[in-house]
Amino acid sequence: MKLSSRAARILTIVLLLSIFSVKASNEFPITTNSSFQRRPAIYGDIVVWEDERNIDDDIYGYSFSINQEFQITTGESYQRDPAIHGDIVVWVDYRNGNQDIYGYNLLTAEEFRITTNPNTQSEPAIYGDIVVWTDYRNGNKDIYGCDFSTQEEFQITSDEKDQEDPAIYGDIVVWTDYRNGNKDIYGYNLFTKEEFEITTNKHGQSSPAIYEDIVVWQVLKVDNVDIYGYDLLRKQELSIATNIRHEWNPAIYGISISSLKGGDNPSFAAFRAFMKHFSLDVKSLK
């Protein structure tokens, strides 16, 4: 039987589980400065983070290809919450007396301003030429975006309730939405300009992340926090990590999903649960 490309990819995921488990033990330090470093983001061979070594928070980076650390921002005000895709790093910047979104081109070593509205803009995420963020300009939290290729800013959400914490992959933007009286995960297709609801559970869903056609998020239940997901192509919800311990802040890239578990370091529990789910389902993917 010839498997489809999607089935083959999932089968490869199952077979590589043992390899990833071995790699998980090969931990190494990226930063050794005695100050606090937090909120890392990674793309390719570059990792960026928020760094307190200069009193005011700055954005630093590290290149695995040349094993070299480098400073991205040098302003006296705070720069926080970086995100990266390709050669572009974006972050929240406090230099203008409010929170704006700024960017930096690693290839040209040029910094640039993305938002100019006097209200707060925070929580940036980037994919290709598109950066999205949480915006306070309308008296609530909305999701806005900017297309670098056209220099055009655009509004994604307009509901009177809050929308926050966006993530983006390709043409799909996802976020945490409060319109139903609890936290749900919603999405928007930048190409078709269609908004869609991903979760309908009565519990609070938040902290979405997306890679290709898979969206993951955390679910706050009465006695614990679990990790769930959704396959946008198959329109199927996935139960990824439903441990009795708290697991939150999921991240997804390629073939792995990780989460913070019980306040410890990122674990592979969600990844293993994801593999268990799909290893039973490969035959149905044709």
Image: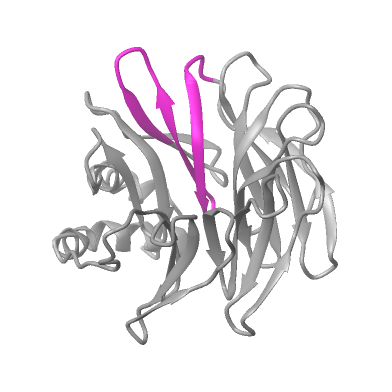
Answer above or below: position of 188 versus 150: above
**Main SS category, magenta section:** strand
Most foreground residue, 5 or 164: 164
Residue at the spot 63% in from the left edge and 35% down from the top edge: 164
Residue at the spot 51% in from the left edge and 19% down from the top edge: 201
Residue at the spot 29% in from the left edge and 66% down from the top edge: 31
Q: Position of residue 121 (x, y in %)?
A: 69, 44
Q: Is residue 205 magenta?
A: yes
Colour convention of the picture: one colour
Most foreground residue, 7 or 230: 230
Residue at the spot 55% in from the left edge and 68% down from the top edge: 74
Most foreground residue, 86 or 281: 86
Residue 57 left/right relative to 181: left
Q: Position of residue 167 (x, y in %)?
A: 58, 48
The span shown in magenta is: 201-228
Q: Quadrant of the N terminus?
A: bottom left
What count of labels does the image hold?
A: 0
Q: Position of residue 14 (x, y in %)?
A: 26, 56
Q: Position of residue 96 (x, y in %)?
A: 72, 52
Answer above or below: position of 98 versus 184: below
Q: Is residue 32 magenta?
A: no
Residue 55 left/right relative to 102: left
Can residue 135 be seen by looking at this rendering?
yes
Can residue 212 be seen by looking at this rendering?
no
Residue 100 left/right relative to 264: right
